[in-house]
Amino acid sequence: MTESSKDKTKRNLIKAMKQYRPTYNTSLFFNDYSERIEALSVFSKIRTPLSRIYPDITFIFYLRTCGGRTNRIHNVPKNKLNTAKIWIPQIQVFTTDRIDEGSVEDVLERINYEHLNINVSQQKTKSLNTSWIDTVKKQEPQKLQDYFSLPRSPRRFNITNKKATVLVIQEDEVLF
């Protein structure tokens, strides 16, 4: 039986979360609807410089969309103003240690994306793995191909600085 692409993505994401056990989640929210397409470029360009700043921290980057209230998003098209939520891109950066929010903003400036209306927030949680993995298991990955109007689905998941963390291997546990 062949595995679908979405099942493979879910399986690999869950496996990474269980193996690397990140404790911090830094989120980049794109708060301007007209700039949402830039998320693909930011997602690909932010990974290397951020990983070089923190070579001893493992990064798990995840591109997704999330629902935001229309009164908090800039430049929402008039035909979407009456909806309760509007879908905007979000880059989640899961890390094994804390990174400075200012360094994320510095990297955005260095790669010439400081003009974007991006909100950076960070949270630390002990239950990040468990609750997040349960959510990923229940939900289907968003259809980023349709959202960004692309011929094929973009890469939504990446791990950098893998060697910075000792892996947690659980041989008896089913990862998916």
Image (cartoon, rainbow, N blue to C red):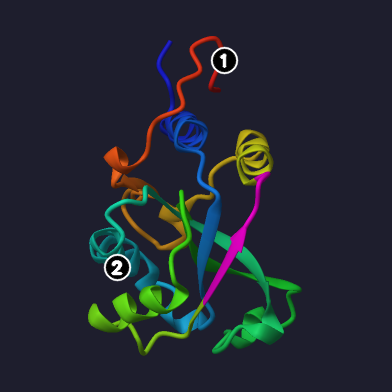
- Mark seen at residue 173: 1
**Residue at the location (69% across, 42% down)?**
131
Q: Residue 135 in the image: state x and y as whole percent.
A: 66, 41
Relative side of 143 to 111, left or right: right
- Comparing 43 with 108, the one in front is 108
Dominant SS in magenta: strand
- Magenta segment, which residues? 120-127
Dot 1: element: loop
**Crowd band around label 1 with a 10 angstrom C-alpha radius: few (<14), some (14–19), many (20+):** few
Q: Is residue 121 magenta?
A: yes
Q: Residue 78 in the image: state x and y as whole percent.
A: 62, 88
Residue 169: name its quadrant.
Answer: top left
- Comparing 165 with 37, the one in front is 165
How far, Cα to Cα, is label 1 from label 2? 36 Å
Q: Residue 65 in the image: state x and y as whole percent.
A: 54, 60
- Comparing 35 with 118, the one in front is 118
> Is residue 96 depicted above or below 43 in this figure?
above
